[in-house]
Amino acid sequence: MKGLPRGGILCIVGARPNYMKMAPLMRAFGAHDTLPRPLLVHTGQHYDVAMNDRLFSDLELPAPDLNLEVGSATHAVQTAEIMRRIEPVLDETRPACVVLVGDVNSTLAVALVAAKKAIPIAHVEAGLRSYDRAMPEEINRILTDQLSDLLYTTERSAGDNLAREGIARDRIHFVGNVMIDSVMRHRTRAVASAETLGREHCPWSASEMKRGFALVTLHRPSNVDDAASLEESLQVLDAMSRQLPVVWPVHPRTRGNIERFGLGAKAASRRIFLLPPQGYLEMLGLMRDAQVVLTDSGGIQEETTALAVPCLTMRENTERPITVDEGTNTLVGRDCKHIMACVEEILAGRGKRGQRPELWDGHAAERIASHLATWLAAPAETREHVTA
Ligand code: UD1
């Protein structure tokens, strides 16, 4: 840690969905004339090479200036360990502000420590609410927002959520979606699905793929953490694979649970092709080329909306309602009949095409950089009046 410059902008990442949000921010901060230098700290929440190194290079994210190497643990231990390890970093570097993205444990852990040291906190992707406190991310979102000085939002409904929780409108800034900045920057470099499937030795013939394929991702505790839910999720995949072949990059948490619950045989089908976690450019290509995406991810709901690909979200709620109201997303839960009816509609060409939401234009990070620069330059007592 020695040798890290003081007074910079401390940018925190911990888990995979943080990287595509932070990459455009690091770029915009670095390119800005007056902002202090951005420093990147990785908490080490995700440590798999497949979930890290590849994504960093795909996204042109610089190597972290520091890795806290916390690894996996229970939520309490992981959060506490990040807090313990970030404290001396904040003391040493005394940043001008801390920039946090999303809703993972790393986000909340750093917010708790920075807030008590009176270091300004900017939360990017603030105000999203599923109103489902069974999701660990919902707890992380609510608390991080309460502790943040600057709340940058991706959709207007997020600002309303924050206002309802008593957060002053002056601190809420609707800037658009940094995750979509990454989609727009990299979509022309997306790796074609045929190339990815070929590289992974997919056994399907052209005729087996004549109706295209479905892309699946599943990792939410509600879908994969107990044997009954995971088995139900696998039944949905089985039903779907009878309509069109299923490509499934499997999250390590899900893969571990398939083994733990002895469900390997249920996941093994010629029509369901299991892949290891993929790089960003491979995932972009798989999403772009899929007929339909079935997921429980937060980010993929947004990315499919930006790519105009129909998305079925295997959850009862979403913290990203604009993807349903304006985009290509449909909430389907785990109801197999309903899901299959939606798949039929999509295959018949009647899937949602949607439209790209307001300010999902590839420039959200620049808007944040320019607002943050003005805010940091203003005297503390007038900062709250600096608008985005
Ligand atoms: C975390 C985030 C979730 C995000 C997801 C994306 C929280 C509360 N959850 O969930 O919001 O959508 O990342 O991936 O922060 N594991 C590995 N290698 C790794 C990381 C994890 O094998 O590099 C396995 C471990 O068995 C670990 C499990 O996955 O126990 C869960 O990892 P963890 O980071 O705790 O949560 P995610 O499920 O990945």
Image (tube, helix red, strand yellow):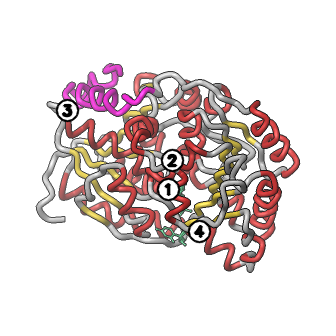
Q: First in sequence, mark 4 or 1: give its number.
A: 1
Q: Mark 1 points at which residue?
A: 195
| Image location of residue 372, percent across then percent down | 28, 31
Q: First in sequence, mark 2 or 4: give its number.
A: 4
Q: First in sequence, mark 1 or 3: give its number.
A: 3
**Residue 131 shows in this picture:** no
Circle 4: is it few (<14), some (14-19), or many (20+) Cα within 10 Å? some
Q: Distance between the residues labelled 2 and 4?
A: 23 Å
What's drawn in magenta, residue-wise? 361-388
Q: What element carries label 1?
A: helix
Q: First in sequence, mark 2 or 1: give its number.
A: 1
Q: Distance between the residues labelled 2 and 1?
A: 9 Å
Residue 254 figure quarter: bottom right
Residue 32: image tag: 3
Q: Mark 2 points at which residue?
A: 285
Q: What residue type is labelled 4?
A: Arg
Q: Which amino acid does label 2 sit on?
A: Gly
Horizontal side of 251 relative to 236 (left or right) equals: left
Residue 365 figure quarter: top left
Camera-near label (2 vs 1) is: 1
Is the CB of mark 4 within 8 Å of ligand 1? Answer: yes
Q: Distance between the residues labelled 4 and 3?
A: 38 Å
Q: What residue type is labelled 1?
A: Glu
